Image (cartoon, rainbow, N blue to C red):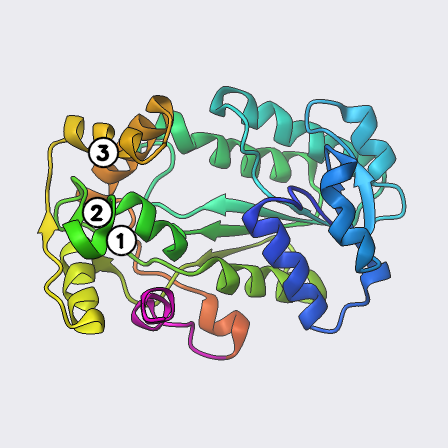
Amino acid sequence: MILVTGATGNLGRATINALLNNGIKPQDISALVRDEAKGADFKLKGIQVKLGNYDDVESLKRAFQGVNKLLLVSSSSDIVHRYDQHKNVIDAATATGISHIVYTSFDMKDLRESTMAGDVQYHALTTDYLRQVAIPYTSMNNTLYADMVPMIGGKDILKNGISIPAGLGKVPFLPITEMAETLAIVLTTPGHTNKKYVIAAENAFSFAEIAEMMSEITGTRIPYNQIEVSSYVSQLVQQGVSEDDARYLARFAKAISIGEFETNKSDVKYLLGRNAISLKAFLEKLYIK
């Protein structure tokens, strides 16, 4: 039995779809949800829905009964709580005899020394804890989603251009569906225990290059505007992003600008047995209707 936490989120849901597409029977998949009503579509597919909360270890223990492999999708709660929540999941997994945890970590040059260490170092702490408790695990170090480009790039990119204070720093953006496929493979094939994989595209691009790429795709000049951080935060708020989240994304922009995502590593081709979908192909599908 494979259990996917964060099942109603983008990555969790995409991973369940990838498992089904790879031939895993619905009855061999469990989806962990906090609200049973949100798991209704899983039930219709024959997937087991289990109730559990990252803050409630006993609820997790109940949910993990009969589970062999666990996908721990990183918490989306307030950052200050995430490490403790991950510990709860790991402790519950250890107590119930789960044989393998796959954890969605994060890919940067150095999580602890990053300019946004306060936002991301919980990933390093979680991996440290997995090693400490000596449960077989796999760390999937994910880059930024290609799916984020339309949102973090500014309001109405096709009309206003890309506007983000990211300098010429590059990111190996990868679509969520490709990340989910790598997770499905690691969850269903042997040879991945106690390994760390970088889940990123082979090639990284700056937003200036993405603007050029989109200009080619659309046949219209898409400029790249390196706006000030304050303007960027205001822009995101106007798009409906909360001010706290806007400042969080602005810190990502700064990290991009100084090259913190340019790790020049990728295990995607090794895991998929093929080249990942290119950023240009992803954007073409997204913008050319």
Vertical comparison of 235 with 149: above or below: above
Q: Earlier in the sequence, mark 2 or mark 3?
A: 3
Give left or right: position of 265 versus 84: left
- In the rendered structure, the answer to whether residue 130 lies left or right of residue 99 reads left
The quadrant the N terminus occupies is: bottom right
Q: Is residue 166 above or below residue 241?
A: below
Proximity of marks 1 and 2: CB atoms separated by less than 8 Å: yes
Q: Secondary structure at mark 1?
A: loop
**Measuring 69% from the left and 72% from the top, which residue is drawn there?**
22
Q: Label 1 is placed on what type of residue?
A: Glu
The residue carrying pointer 3 sits among few (fewer than 14), some (14 to 19) or many (20 or more) residues within 10 Å by Cα, namely many
Point out residue 76 in the picture as x, y percentages from the top left corner. Answer: 54, 33
Q: Earlier in the sequence, mark 1 or mark 3?
A: 3
Question: For mark 3, what is the residue?
Answer: 235
The segment highlighted magenta reads 274-289
Tell me the residue at 76%/53% (across/down): 42
Q: Which residue is mark 2?
A: 259
Residue 141 visible in the current orientation = yes
Closest to the observer: 61 or 227?
A: 227
Q: Can residue 1 be seen at all in this image of the molecule?
A: no
Label 3 amino acid? Answer: Gln
Q: What residue sits 37% from the left and 26% below the top?
A: 242
Q: Which label is found at residue 109?
A: none
Quarter of the picture containing the C terminus is bottom left
Query: What amino acid is labelled 2 in the image?
Result: Gly
Mark 1 and mark 3: span between their CA atoms? 26 Å
Q: Position of residue 50 (x, y in %)?
A: 82, 41
Q: How many marks?
A: 3
| Occupied quadrant, residue 204 | bottom left
Q: Please state which of residues 223 and 22 is positioned toward the viewer in this rendering.
A: 223
Identify whether 209 is placed above or below 80.
below
Q: Circle 1 sits on which residue?
A: 262
